[in-house]
Image: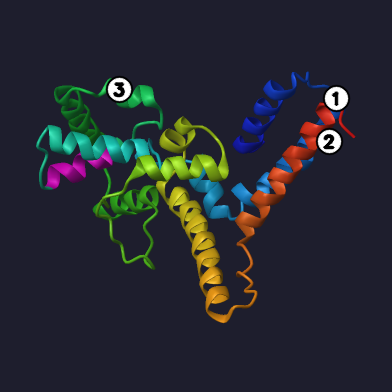
Amino acid sequence: MQQMTKEAIKTLQKKTNHALSVEDFDLIEELDAIANGFAGVTKSERRLLSTPFELCGIKFYPLTVAKSLWYTEKCEEWEVEGSKQDGLLFWLLSLPNTEAELDTYSEQKRADKAVKKLGRQLHCTQKEMTDVYHKCLGITEESGGESKAQDTDYGGMVAVLLREYGGTPDEWLYETPIEMISALFKAYSDKVNAENDAGRRASASKGKAVAPPPSKKLAALAKFREKVKQIEQVWRGEP
């Protein structure tokens, strides 16, 4: 079951005080099928959301917003420079995507020790390390292989994602890969730009302008919200 389905069901139960029964399974299954059309559009996205990458028996996880923020803050706080930054980031990818893991390494001495330990465990080629690194960061040949950190207002971005797509702050910060967040945020930006363009065309021509059709993800999201409202009405006993 998709995470957004689980969250929607939890929210609906709180709002309606409804106790789940066998009769609800069909409705929930229909809702989750719609969620699959939004959250599972491509095989690549499903892989990024659920599967770490393995190297020398060690799992490496897709980069998240929380890890990106932690990395930026610690590089500045600990004055990490040059190749040591690369080593810190690569080690950071080996930590499971949870808040507790990041809290464990709040001291530089402990993090440095963990980075050195990882280095001793890796018996592989530079290419193998680079391949895993690129997979975790969502870097492809088409994207030019750029891996430099961008100055991003994650707070505002997460606020928009919460408003548009639901979920919880922890899910966006600790569980969702940055590549997925970028795709969703771009979809939202494209929608806003299309609406603005339509408004400008209407103003210029004094006619009725039609905005471009929404992406498949946004269309599926709208359908998902409609289904949630339908389930709420059923659980409230409304006609």
Percent x, y of residue 57: 38, 36
- What residue did someone put label 3 on? 103
- What residue did someone put label 2 on? 26
* Left or right of 96 on screen, residue 90: left
Percent x, y of residue 226: 74, 45
The span shown in magenta is: 83-91
Asked if marks 1 and 2 touch (Cβ < 8 Å), the reply is no
Q: Is residue 111 covered in magenta?
A: no
What residue lies at 51% left-to-right and 55% top-to-bottom?
188
Percent x, y of residue 73: 21, 36
12 lies above or below 75: above
Q: Is residue 89 covered in magenta?
A: yes
Disc assigned to residue 22: 1
Any part of residue 55 in sight: no
Asked if marks 3 and 2 touch (Cβ < 8 Å), the reply is no
Query: Splitting the image into 4 quarters, where does residue 234 fall?
Result: top right
User: Magenta-highlighted stretch: main secondary structure?
Assistant: helix
237 lies above or below 84: above
Furthest toward the front, the residue is: 206
Any part of residue 24 in sight: yes
Mark 3: which amino acid? Asp
